[in-house]
Image (tube, rainbow, N blue to C red):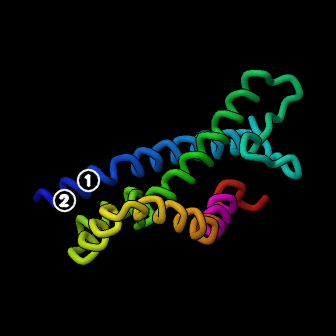
Amino acid sequence: MRKLQSVGLALAGPLANLALFAVAFAVIKVGLGTGTWEYSGAEWSIDRLVVPSAAEAGALEAISRLASITLILNLVLFLFNLLPLPPLDGSSVLAGLFGPGRRLRELLLDSPMGGFGGLILAWIVFPTLFRPVWSVVVAALYGGL
């Protein structure tokens, strides 16, 4: 039972990121579906996944930027924190579910450079994980655009 509690605790942060991502995704998708926003096209950036359809749309511009940043930031945090490398949450999940993973995590965290090495490795590996996930998100967000 204690192992499942530690797994649940380790998953709390990533699941909160996933929930915020889902809310932002829904807001953007509804805005696209209702014609409030449109695909930003070549002007795409982290804070401009969509742009208001109307020329004078100050509040809609702010909401679209907030939703864009919230979507991307929480997707990045969700995926990054689930990598099974110490000190990230994914290593705690793995350690809670898999005995040998627990021993490896403890060895790495006991090492002076173990946690730092895990972050460096995560930084190197992350783009390989993020690109295909981002492609799926973009396809789901924009549909047939």
Q: Residue at x 52, y 51 (%)?
A: 77
Alpha-carbon span between mark 1 and mark 2: 6 Å
The residue beneath circle 2 is 4
Which corner quadrant of the image does residue 1 belong to?
Answer: bottom left
Q: Residue at x 18, y 59 (%)?
A: 4
Magenta residues span 131-139
| Residue in the foreground of this view, choosing between 84 and 117 | 117
Do residues under tags 1 and 2 come within 8 Å of each other at their CB atoms? yes
**Residue 30: percent from left, percent from top:** 63, 41
**Residue 2: percent from left, percent from top:** 12, 57
Q: Which image quadrant: the C terminus?
A: bottom right
**Residue 131: percent from left, percent from top:** 66, 67
Within 10 Å of disc 1 (Cα), the crowding (few <14, some 14-19, many 20+) is some
Marker disc for residue 8: 1
Q: Does the magenta segment cover residue 30?
A: no
Q: Main secondary structure of the magenta part?
A: helix
Q: Would you place residue 122 above or below residue 77 in this image?
A: below
Marker disc for residue 92: none
Q: Would you place residue 109 above or below residue 72 in this image?
A: below
133 left or right, relative to 109: right
Q: Residue at x 68, y 59 (%)?
A: 138
* Identity of the residue furthest to the left in this view: 1
**Residue 58: percent from left, percent from top:** 78, 22
**Please, what secondary structure does the residue beneath circle 1 have?**
helix
13 left or right, relative to 6: right
45 left or right, relative to 123: right
| Residue in the foreground of this view, choosing between 109 and 91 | 109
Q: Amino acid at mark 1?
A: Gly
Q: Amino acid at mark 2?
A: Leu
Q: Residue at x 79, y 38 (%)?
A: 51
